[in-house]
Image (spheres, helix red, strand yellow):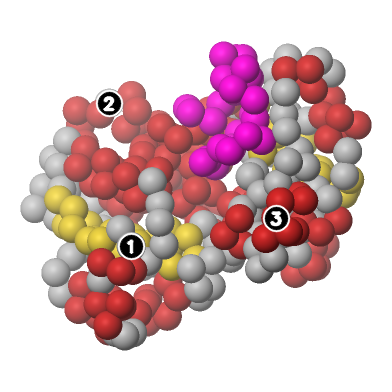
């Protein structure tokens, strides 16, 4: 594994290895404090981020490494017209590994052709977000003890949500995973996910616009926000942004061991009253992101 651009770049065996490594880091953090001593991570974020960028930086620092980079395109030579390829080629002269976020689908893939250092896709437009998917898989495995034989509901923006697309692609490779896709018609999962992932892998799935109707079936509920930045029409965004809001009342018919995930940031799609519910896993999920990224950095740098 030279780069991680798409979650499908890695096998389920490699995913299990990363999860095992992350769990060992959680149990034995002192073993890893100098694993990346003298190594440098470059964070090239052409699009704003809080959790992903800071978790990458925290991951490298906890491994004993250093961090350099920028947090917005305006802070880089992209503002002068420099191409992504040239930026990455130069930065790979200074860093041992690169985490890159870009608003254009495919930009990290282009970067991987030019870089002399491993590239990690930290999100490209509405396409992929593989390290968030690894975070989600680690969280589900720690909560459920397995990644097969579960029913997973995705609720909200399933059209533009790259975290949803990546997680569906990953879970489709595990046995007996049933998908429940909950969204308004305008935000349904894209046709290529339905055709090239769900149907191709012969996954059982249903589509509905009614969260309340299906919540009792779910082992995992993956909530998403309706993303203003993915809309071309402000009126459509305003009309759909409050389509699905999870409240304590809606959990009355949910399983006692339901796991509620959210890639964050949250706007208002999950009531803050749910934060104290033992089924709320999203802040633990955010913490897991640091550990799985530590495991991935070690894997790509070939550090035992």
Find disc 3 in the rendering and name its residue. Answer: 237
Find disc 2 in the rendering and name its residue. Answer: 28
- Mark 3 or mark 2: whose residue is earlier in sequence: 2
Asked if the stretch drawn in magenta spans residue 198, the answer is no
Q: Quadrant of residue 110?
A: bottom left
Distance CA(mark 1)–CA(mark 3): 24 Å
Marks 3, 2: nearer the viewer: 3
Q: Position of residue 190 (x, y in %)?
A: 75, 64
The correct choice, above or below, for 178 with respect to 125 in the image is above
Instruction: Using the rendered image of the protein, determine whether residue 116 is visible from the camera's viewpoint.
Output: no
Give the SS element for disc 3.
helix
- Mark 1 or mark 3: whose residue is earlier in sequence: 1
Q: Position of residue 35 (x, y in %)?
A: 17, 44
The correct choice, above or below, for 115 with respect to 6 in the image is below
Q: Which residues are magenta?
A: 260-284
The residue under the point 87% across, 49% down is: 207
Instruction: Using the rendered image of the protein, determine whether residue 184 is visible from the camera's viewpoint.
Output: yes
Q: Quadrant of residue 198?
A: bottom right
Residue 46 versus residue 302: which sits nearer the camera? 46
Left/right placement of residue 176 relative to residue 133 reads right
The residue under the point 26% across, 41% down is: 58
Find disc 1 in the rendering and name its residue. Answer: 72
Left/right placement of residue 36 relative to residue 144 reads left
Local packing at callout 3 (Cα closer than 10 Å; few below 14, some 14-19, many 20+) is some
The residue under the point 54% across, 49% down is: 133
Which residue occupies the extreme left position in the image? 38
Q: Which mark is residue 286?
A: none
Give the SS element for disc 2.
loop
Q: Are marks 1 and 3 in contact (CB under 8 Å)?
A: no
Residue 60 versus residue 32: which sits nearer the camera? 60
């Amino acid at each position: 594994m030279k780069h991680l651009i798409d979650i499908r770049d890695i096998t389920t065996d490699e995913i299990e290895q990363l999860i095992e490594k992350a769990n060992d880091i959680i149990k034995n953090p002192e073993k890893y404090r100098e694993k990346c001593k003298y190594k440098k991570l470059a964070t090239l974020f052409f699009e704003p981020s809080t959790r992903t960028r800071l978790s990458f930086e925290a991951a490298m620092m906890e491994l004993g490494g250093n961090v350099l980079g920028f947090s917005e395109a305006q802070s880089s030579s992209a503002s002068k017209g420099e191409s992504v390829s040239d930026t990455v080629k130069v930065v790979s002269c200074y860093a041992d590994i690169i985490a890159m976020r870009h608003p254009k689908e495919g930009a990290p893939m282009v970067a991987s052709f030019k870089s002399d250092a491993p590239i990690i896709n930290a999100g490209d437009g509405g396409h992929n977000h593989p390290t968030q998917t690894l975070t989600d898989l680690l969280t589900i495995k720690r909560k459920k003890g397995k990644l097969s034989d579960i029913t997973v509901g995705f609720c909200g923006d399933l059209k533009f949500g790259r975290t949803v697309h990546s997680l569906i692609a990953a879970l489709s490779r595990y046995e007996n995973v049933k998908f429940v896709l909950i969204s308004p018609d305008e935000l349904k999962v894209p046709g290529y996910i339905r055709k090239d992932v769900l149907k191709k892998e012969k996954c059982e799935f249903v589509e509905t616009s009614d969260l309340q109707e299906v919540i009792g079936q779910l082992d995992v509920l993956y909530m998403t926000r309706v993303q203003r930045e993915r809309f071309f029409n402000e009126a459509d965004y305003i009309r759909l942004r409050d389509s699905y809001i999870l409240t304590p009342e809606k959990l009355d018919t949910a399983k006692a061991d339901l796991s509620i995930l959210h890639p964050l940031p949250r706007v208002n799609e999950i009531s803050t009253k749910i934060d104290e519910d033992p089924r709320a896993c999203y802040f633990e999920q955010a913490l897991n992101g640091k550990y799985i990224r530590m495991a991935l950095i070690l894997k790509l740098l070939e550090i035992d």
